[in-house]
Amino acid sequence: PAYFLRLLPCAPPSAVQIKKLGPDRNAVRAAVAPAAAKAAAAKAADGSAAAAPAEPPLLPTPVYNAGVVSDALMLLHATLLQRAAATAPRAMTDGLLLLKVWAAQQGISPASPTPCPDGLDGHLAAMLMAHLVQQGKLSASMSALQALRAALHALCDPLAGLPKGVAMAAAAPETVTAAARSAAPKLTHPPFE
């Protein structure tokens, strides 16, 4: 059997301004040719820019912004998942497998026969389980079925589970950067046979 090593390069959280990547912001700009930029600057200097039509407003890019934030917080998420898995190892890992199978059977997973690209992927499911561990709703003494039930309860019951829904948390950029600096994830792997 051949072994593969996947390297996932990621920028540190300090490389991007997370507060500018909200779901209502535009982070993609159209490229302007240098000649057109010089002509626009010359018109602005002449005062003839007032007669020019206004540029259309830029639409928000929430999917792109979420991807950039996810990439920037990759190390922080890895550390969070490792800590949660250390707290409730069996319940979290086995419950996560059951949750992924359930999502695929329901057709809301990218791995399902009819893929749903914006559905419950593995990373989002793992972060949900880590959130439940942090909230004390998953413990080491729970079985895999109890962990799955807790996750499904969190997804379907807005009062007991996730009262504000599943959304990007608005942490202060300094907090995210400090946490990412202190997060040195320990790489683990299954034993080779």
Image (cartoon, rainbow, N blue to C red):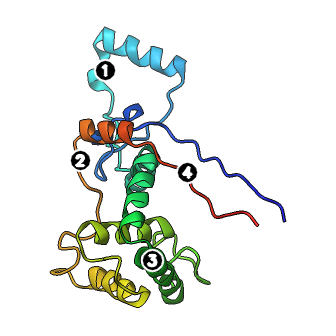
Residue 80, disc: none
- Which callout, 3 or 2, points to the residue nearer the camera? 3
- Tell me the SS state at disc 2: loop
Vertical placement of residue 72 versus 126, above or below: above
The label shown at residue 49 is 1
* Whole-number angstrom distance, CA of label 3 to CA of label 2: 29 Å
Task: Give the SS element for disc 3.
Answer: helix
Disc sitting over residue 90 in the figure: 3
Q: Is residue 111 left or right of residue 145?
A: right
Give the residue at x 59% y 76%. 111
Q: Mark 4 against mark 1, which lies toward the viewer?
A: 4
Q: Quadrant of the C terminus?
A: bottom right
Q: Check disc 4 and report the residue beneath it.
A: 187
User: Which mark sits nearer the N-terminus, 1 or 2?
Assistant: 1
The earlier-in-sequence mark between 4 and 1 is 1
Q: Position of residue 62 (x, y in %)?
A: 37, 54
Quadrant the N terminus occupies: bottom right
**Residue 171's disc number:** 2
Residue 160, horizontal then vertical, whole percent: 17, 81
Residue located 48% across and 83% down the image: 103
Secondary-structure class at tag 1: helix
